[in-house]
Amino acid sequence: MNSDRRLRELAFEPLVAAAKANPKALLTLATEAQRNGDLDRCLTLVEQALALQPDDPETRYRARQLRARAVPSWHFTMMQDHLRNEAFLEAIERAVQPDMTVLDIGSGSGLLAMIAARAGAREVHSCEMNPVIAKVAQEIVSRNGLADSVTIHNTNSQKLDPQADLGGLADLVISEIIGKDLVCEQVLPSMRDAARRLAKPGAQFIPHSGEIRIALAHYGKLGKRFVDEACGFDLSPFNTLHGARFHVQVYDPALELRSESVSLFDFDFTSRDDHPDTARIDLVSNSGTANGVVQWFRLQMDAQSSFENPPGRDSSWSWALVFFPFGEELDLSPGDRVSVTGRIVNNLLCLWRG
């Protein structure tokens, strides 16, 4: 713990003690705890405020607002993604055998853990870092009558003790910590750690591998993301502050591919070895103007099934694409080659031309 955080805590606790009978003051302190990244403390203060005034509309509203701020909105879209849900459902039901111990990394609502339990797993251990989500996931598990077989652990999977927490190594590892660029939700270190410490040798993983796929593209709305002038002033230097990547919906008609797609990275989630972090590849143009590279992913669920989210996919898909602009437009002829480099830095895909 760094000294600045320790000093904040020393100053914070007397305020909590003084506000113990004041729900509005407790909620204000919960907001501060959330701002400082202490979600556990925030949730505790929210519960204390609700216990004091459970029927007060303002208290209920502010408590709900604080909880919602701690939960990314994409969780709701993801839970309603029937393509995703069916792919996991089918693979899990094929894999689960009686007396299996299953590890589910990234509980979310607890859906995948409950699928494994319903399929016949003896024990399912599911881990969720976010305390707000973990608490609700446990409630959902209980509501569906599976509390005897599903345990939600409010922790990162890399902090689990295989004996104390799981009662032994897992026979099957399920994970859905897949970000838009595949890697930004820490799937690589989490899977490597699970393979090394938490799973039996030869344990099955769902998904068992994932590809980062890319293609040359032209995005017709790119100019709208940058500034030129306003009220007669040149604002173009502000464009240097624009991000080096942004999200594009899979069904955006302004996105046109300018090459065949290729695999930039292909990760084996069952491997105990370190994954490659750099790749360089040539994309071969099929003609037209290109102003960037578009990226999506493909998951191999098991030996029988896979799915991916390429451009033009059904709009119900919960993952967007990632677009990496070049900073200039390239007028390409068929067969022209454009070299791009990809690198995984701090669990984030970086990609540039050259």
Image (cartoon, grey):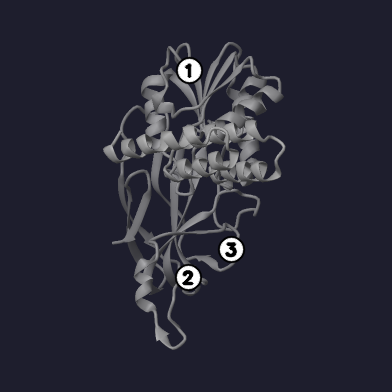
Front of the two marks 1 and 2:
2
Amino acid type, callout 1: Ala
Q: Say which element carries label 3.
A: loop
Residue 55, above or below 271: below
Q: Which residue lies furthest to the bottom in this view?
A: 232
Percent x, y of residue 211: 44, 43
The residue under the point 37% across, 73% down is 238
Discs 1, 2 touching: Cβ within 8 Å:
no
CA gap, disc 1 to disc 2?
Answer: 47 Å
Q: Say which element carries label 1.
A: strand
Front residue (pair 1, 267): 1
Q: Kindly indicate the quadrant of the structure image that contains residue 346.
A: top left
The residue under the point 65% across, 27% down is 139
CA gap, disc 2 to disc 3?
Answer: 15 Å
Amino acid type, callout 3: Asp
Name the N-terminal-most of marks 1 and 3. 1
Give the residue at mark 2.
225
The circle drawn on residue 103 is none
Give the residue at mark 3.
252
Give the residue at mark 1.
170
Residue 209, above or below 179: above
Front of the two marks 2 and 3:
2
Residue 264, above or below 292: above
Percent x, y of residue 235: 39, 79
